[in-house]
């Protein structure tokens, strides 16, 4: 957010804009290779990082990448981004700035059902349009956001799509027209346009602060971060609804629909141990389903410690052993982010030494 | 080229299109992280690779990445791309396809001098336009290409720019208009437009087969591959002219101007040992100058064995030691691409063992 503010008026911006940018840091963005609402068109953090200064766990200082973005040798900058602190501490980050687009058009598509909204998403992408952003909010989250920000969202709609296109003035009008037509063909109740910059910013505020509005729905919440191929969004959303019903957990959804990156938000009360257990079970089922559908257990928030047990469902023992060896190049004694990201032989609670080099090499 | 042909009529294409695509392989593209004329807008090979199947030097088979492009853990796909065969052999490659743009406009800007042409490049990028391609050919190469393909290039022009914009029909006209205006302001003698698809393809054929036309100029040639910040193109081109004059070597230029990726082509006769020595000296000077200007000794063709002695001018001993350790994770005995890319203790002719793990770790 500081970087975004600092660039105001220069004609340039830093393209990745995590919804959490009021709270997150650029170092955290590098560690988890953050995405955001504009990832669909502009890519994730790694696409916008030119160089890094890194302190390795042994105290040595290395420079990765270069400000021109062209470096021979192995792409260690790309390797570091998303390594969740397991390679060392990043102390300086050189980012690539993106010129501000000449024009935006920001649309709000209002749909009776989540299925209609996902149908519209498929048709938009299928028509060859790559919106700058394509975000979905379901009825549950719309209710919370409306109570907080009074934008004028219809409370009875099944889902809304926030769609933004950017580019040349003349091109965005044509794209916006096409999108309106596609939404209408997908049985949208209504498609609104942000007619002023103020209205556009309010719409984005509603989306970006949606998580803050969840306090109106329940005392605690657990956000999941899964990925499915975009064509399977209707299926995973139906599964999530069903999963919530089975476990007696209310789940609302606000997410990067264009990327197939879901963010089901499981609502509960952390003072109730039985509810907590059901939330963990439901989360596990949803992420397992994402894997079955050919997706992943994280789109942008990383593995950390919470999802470490999914790693051996996603990777073979050989794949994990190779990652472990790469880990040991930078962090042989596990001084930085120990027990993060890579499963240890005995599960995430065991000591680092159990997955150190000689044993791992022998396992290969 | 096979992939490109295979996709004809599907509405999709594989975006990286190396000028050498009549001869190169997709495995080679992955090994060197190839660019091409459309890199300016569409990026290099790594931006279009979703997953790899790799045979490691010990014979084990690993899968890197996933077809959805979202994989947690370290980005080993990105690490493998550009590793020049030093990590193993790639046996299966999953690429990302790009939807064909709705429309193109292809322009040929004709300039009296290289300086005018580079001025136009700076102004185009400065105006916020990102052409799909922005290629320069100087007088020497234009003469050879014209003799080979009879396109109608003016033989007395100092430089020509091949500029392509793509996107929506309505947008490309506006962008093409702007580019024509900018070229005229930069004292272009003339700006031509490809008015038919046939004319566009011929223009691209001239560019892509320019290297084949060099046989008309001299019995042997050595193409260099350097990078400078785009704003320093006039300076490096002047240096190249001067360098050629000092060494008595004729140098012609055809290159990815929009990326600052130069390809000076040094003309000589390999039967003349003195000429060969002068070509090597001149090449060394040009690449050293690229480094001094904050650039790199390779934009897309890699380090291989030829440029290995530049690595310690680009990287500190610590940086190289880290790369060596990463190398050893995959290829500890140097079975694949030995003596490529990373300098050994005693120069590129010495045995791999001299840069094996224990010594390297001790050096850190």
Image (cartoon, coloured by chain):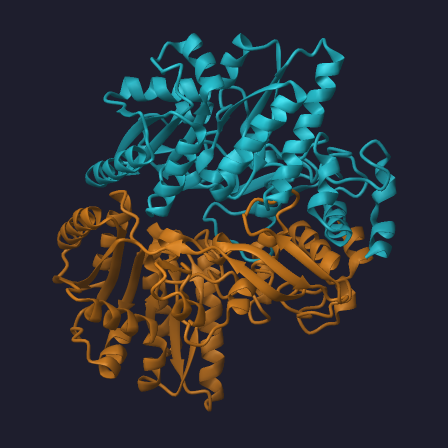
Chain colours: A cyan, B orange
Q: Quadrant of residue B239?
A: bottom left
- Of the pair A8 and B119, the residue shown nearer to us: A8
Q: In which quadrant of the rendered view does residue A239 lie? A: top right
Residue B107 rendering spot, x and y as whole percentages: 20, 60
Q: Position of residue A364 (x, y in %)?
A: 81, 57
For residue B146, say whether it is visible.
yes
Quadrant assignment for the N terminus of chain B: bottom left
State how many labels appear. Answer: 0
Say which residue appears at 24% left-offset and 80% top-offset. B149
Residue nearer the viewer, A78 or A58: A78
B44 left or right of A294 in image = left
Q: Nearer the viewer, residue A339 or B11?
A: B11
The image shows residue B165 at horizontal and vertical percentages of 26, 54
Please tell me which residue is depicted at 27% across the width and 75% down the height of the picture.
B140
In this rendering, is residue B159 above or below B273? above
Q: Is residue A347 left or right of residue A206?
A: right
**Can residue A14 be seen here?**
no
Q: Is residue B127 above or below residue B140?
A: above
The image quadrant that residue B246 belongs to is bottom left
Q: Residue at x 63, y 44 (%)?
A: A292
Vertical placement of A31 versus B308: above or below? above
Q: Position of residue A314 (x, y in %)?
A: 68, 45
Q: Is residue A57 left or right of residue B76?
A: right
């Amino acid at each position: 957010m500081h970087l975004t503010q600092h660039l105001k008026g220069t004609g340039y911006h830093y393209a990745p804009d995590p919804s959490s940018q009021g709270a997150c840091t650029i170092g955290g963005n590098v560690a988890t290779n953050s995405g955001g609402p504009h990832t669909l068109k502009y890519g994730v953090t790694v696409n916008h990082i030119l160089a890094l200064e890194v302190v390795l766990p042994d105290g040595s200082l290395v420079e990765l990448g270069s400000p021109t973005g062209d470096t021979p040798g192995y792409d260690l900058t790309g390797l570091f981004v998303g390594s969740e602190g397991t390679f060392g501490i990043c102390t300086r980050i050189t980012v690539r700035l993106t010129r501000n687009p000449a024009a935006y058009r920001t649309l709000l598509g209002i749909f009776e059902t989540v299925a209609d909204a996902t149908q519209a998403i498929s048709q938009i992408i299928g028509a060859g349009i790559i919106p700058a952003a394509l975000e979905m909010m379901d009825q549950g989250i719309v209710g919370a956001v409306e109570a907080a920000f009074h934008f004028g969202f219809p409370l009875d709609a099944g889902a809304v799509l926030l769609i933004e296109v950017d580019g040349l003035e003349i091109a965005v009008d044509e794209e916006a027209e096409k999108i309106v037509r596609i939404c209408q063909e997908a049985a949208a109740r209504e498609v609104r346009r942000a007619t002023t910059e103020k209205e556009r910013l309010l719409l984005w505020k509603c989306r970006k602060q949606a998580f803050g509005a969840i306090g109106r729905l329940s005392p605690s919440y657990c956000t999941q971060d899964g990925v499915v191929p975009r064509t399977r969004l209707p299926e995973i959303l139906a599964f999530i609804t069903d999963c919530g019903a089975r476990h007696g957990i209310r789940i609302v959804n606000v997410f990067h629909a264009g990327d197939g990156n879901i963010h089901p938000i499981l609502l509960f009360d952390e003072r109730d141990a039985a509810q907590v257990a059901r939330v963990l079970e439901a989360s596990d089922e949803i992420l397992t389903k994402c894997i079955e559908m050919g997706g992943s257990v994280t789109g942008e928030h990383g593995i950390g410690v919470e999802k470490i047990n999914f790693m051996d469902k996603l990777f073979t023992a050989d794949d994990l052993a190779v990652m472990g060896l790469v880990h040991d190049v930078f962090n042989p004694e596990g001084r930085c982010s120990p027990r993060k990201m890579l499963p240890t032989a005995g599960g995430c609670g065991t000591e680092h030494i159990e997955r150190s080099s000689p044993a791992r090499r022998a396992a290969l």
